[in-house]
Amino acid sequence: MSSALDRLKNLTNKISSYETARKQNLKILKDLFMELAIDKKVDNFDDLFNFKAVNLSGVSLNDETLGEIKKGRYLQILAISYDKNAIQKSKNISLAYFGRVENVENELKNKVVDFVIRYRFEKSFMTLEHYHDMLGKFGQKSE
């Protein structure tokens, strides 16, 4: 009995920790949305999540080289939109352009990387909720 209760406590703590992290993430993401002037391209913060994905050019997002610049490139936040009815299904849209990555201040570069990671963090929660809802509608109900 104690081990089942311990597992339940651990699970509850983990879920609570994720929700706290998610709320904090959204607050910082909204601040970065304004600070990086993405609101000039996307009027409403919530509309940001209508994009299929957000990526960046000029800086690495790989674990091993996170934040390293790619010389000769331009630092830019890109959104990927998807239209299943269009001839060209996906389209890249520049949300923010900062110039040659070598000329961008390190603090700004780090905020851009932070924005993209925080966007992906929130988007992953939204995806999880979407598939959870789908399972509720279609999947077999456990007893």
Image (cartoon, grey):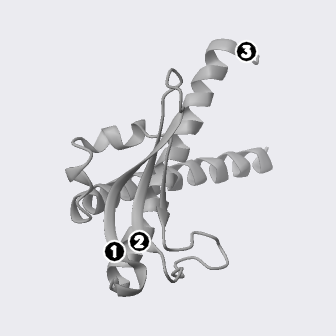
Question: x and y percent of residue 28 in the render?
Answer: 32, 61
Query: N-terminal of the two: label 1 or label 3?
Result: 1
Disc 2/disc 1 C-alpha distance (Å): 6 Å
> Which residue matches tag 3?
141
Q: Quadrant of residue 100?
A: bottom left
Q: Residues within 10 Å of mark 2 (few under 14, many from 20)?
A: many
Q: Which residue sits at x=59%, y=38%?
A: 128
Can residue 20 be seen in this snapshot? no
Q: Pointer 2 and pointer 1: residues touching (CB < 8 Å)?
A: yes
Helix, strand or loop status at disc 3:
loop
Query: N-terminal of the two: label 2 or label 3?
Result: 2
Question: x and y percent of residue 85 in the render?
Answer: 51, 20
Residue 121 as seen in the image, left or right of residue 36? right
> Which residue matches tag 2?
75
| Foreground tag (2 vs 3) | 2
Helix, strand or loop status at disc 2:
strand
Question: x and y percent of residue 132 in the render?
Answer: 61, 28
